[in-house]
């Protein structure tokens, strides 16, 4: 029964992974709860495949095998069941060791919890406990069973499986994509990563509401990146860091424009419920800092402190930045900057933004962020190349303009 539960969970994981592979960040599963509890983030990570095959398929095969082994052993007694129990013990040991590995990857590398995956971890842990209980019962009734049908033999299988999984991790650990400095043209990118090129250029192109407010970078840059974000959003914090790195690598090629889309009904009529209750206040702080020419610095500090964005924290940040505190406090008290946040949010509503961050590279919409830093560079090279060729909305893309 427990192995059958593992089989059912594995099937759901295979389905969700398939949808993510087909639709990318445009797909949202039922277990995409928030930044931390997020199956899509885990199953869309580079660790979700082994040798190019989704790990869900390996889990499916493993639990199908275990279900068959336990079922066969159930219909036999004594020494006749030893072979099936041996096979089941090896399978359980492997599933247990691999579950520990994947749980570690989820928590320490991806920094997210997959509810479906956690279900498999629970199944594997339960099977380990049941296996120990079954072995103990069989050894009492039939003491002459083989060495694998023993606590010591099962413990050895666990150790061996752990070592095997460690070797597998070493052999298959995904490398971080880095940009080849020789890639400088649109055709270079097309040849270097044709899958990314096709996926990227098939996204729609819209008018993202570009303006001079909250712009960072070269005014005449070939590529303008508009980011709609929430200052309490964990994914937005990571996207912010990646975009800062991109700006450092390409200071003359890109212009970043920040737009507010707080998941807070207090200032965003596009959302139905408040998810981040300090997001509006933090956005006001960024705008009040912009009046003193310190928008970028305040943005960095707010993202860094996004878990404790109380008014006291905001005032402390403003003091540390050396702002004129009388003007800053007056601005925060007046609520005069909320008009900009509302304006941004209304643009976001017209653009049908559902989640943050949402990025627009020369108007090309990307929901979420890229996993690899190099993909940001690819996107810039593609847009710069298309702009130079006068084909910013090439046939592969769908063009849409949002009226103000």
Image: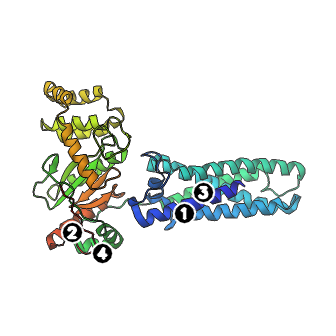
In depth, the one of 22 and 384 nearer the eye is: 22
The image position of residue 399, as x and y in percent, is: 24, 67
* Looking at the image, residue 278 lies above or below residue 239: above
Please report whichever mark, 2 or 1, sits nearer to the chain's N-terminal start.
1
Report the quarter where the N terminus lies. Answer: bottom right
Report the disc number at residue 184.
2
Report the quarter where the C terminus lies. Answer: bottom left
| Dot 1: element | helix
Q: Do the residues under discs 4 and 1 have CB atoms within 8 angstroms?
A: no
Question: Residue at horizontal 32%, vertical 72%?
Answer: 198
How many angstroms separate mark 2 from mark 4 (CA)? 12 Å
Residue designated by label 3? 9
| Dot 4: element | helix
Please report whichever mark, 3 or 2, sits nearer to the chain's N-terminal start.
3
Residue designated by label 1? 14
Residue designated by label 4? 191
Q: Mark 2 packing: few (<14 Cα in 10 Å), some, or many (20+)?
A: some
Q: Do the residues under discs 3 and 2 have CB atoms within 8 angstroms?
A: no
Give the label, 3 or 2, closer to the camera: 3
């Amino acid at each position: 029964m427990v192995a059958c539960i593992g089989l059912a969970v594995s099937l759901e994981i295979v389905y969700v992974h398939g949808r993510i592979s087909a639709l990318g960040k445009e797909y949202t599963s039922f277990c995409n709860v928030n930044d931390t509890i997020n199956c899509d983030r885990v199953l869309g990570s580079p660790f979700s495949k082994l040798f190019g095959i989704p790990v869900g398929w390996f889990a499916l095969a493993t639990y199908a095998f275990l279900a068959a082994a336990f079922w066969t052993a159930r219909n036999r007694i004594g020494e006749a069941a030893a072979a099936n129990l041996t096979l089941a013990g090896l399978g359980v040991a492997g599933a247990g060791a691999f579950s520990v590995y994947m749980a570690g990857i989820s928590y320490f590398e991806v920094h997210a919890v997959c509810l479906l995956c956690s279900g498999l971890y629970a199944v594997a842990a339960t099977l380990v406990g049941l296996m120990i209980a079954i072995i103990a019962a069989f050894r009492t009734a039939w003491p002459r069973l083989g060495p694998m049908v023993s606590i010591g033999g099962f413990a050895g299988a666990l150790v061996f499986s752990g070592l095997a999984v460690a070797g597998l991790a070493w052999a298959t650990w995904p490398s971080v994509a880095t940009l080849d400095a020789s890639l400088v043209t649109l055709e270079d990118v097309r040849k270097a990563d044709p899958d990314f090129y096709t996926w990227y250029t098939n996204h729609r192109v819209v008018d993202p509401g570009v303006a001079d407010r909250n712009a960072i970078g070269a005014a005449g840059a070939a590529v303008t990146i508009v980011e709609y974000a929430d200052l309490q959003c964990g994914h937005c914090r990571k996207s912010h860091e990646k975009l800062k790195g991109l700006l450092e690598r390409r200071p003359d090629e890109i212009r970043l424009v920040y737009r507010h889309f707080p998941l807070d009904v207090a200032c965003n009529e596009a959302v139905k419920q408040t998810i981040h209750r300090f997001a509006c206040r933090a956005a006001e702080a960024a705008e009040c800092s912009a009046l003193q020419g310190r928008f970028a610095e305040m943005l960095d500090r707010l993202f860094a402190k996004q878990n404790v964005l109380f008014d006291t924290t905001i005032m402390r940040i403003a003091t540390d930045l050396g702002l004129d505190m009388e003007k800053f406090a007056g601005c925060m008290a007046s609520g005069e900057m909320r008009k900009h946040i509302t304006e941004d949010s209304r643009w976001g509503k017209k653009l049908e933004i559902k989640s943050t961050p949402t990025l627009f590279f020369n108007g090309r919409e990307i929901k979420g962020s890229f996993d690899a830093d190099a993909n940001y560079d690819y996107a810039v090279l593609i847009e710069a190349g298309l702009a130079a060729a006068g084909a910013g909305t090439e046939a592969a893309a769908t063009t849409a303009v949002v009226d103000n």
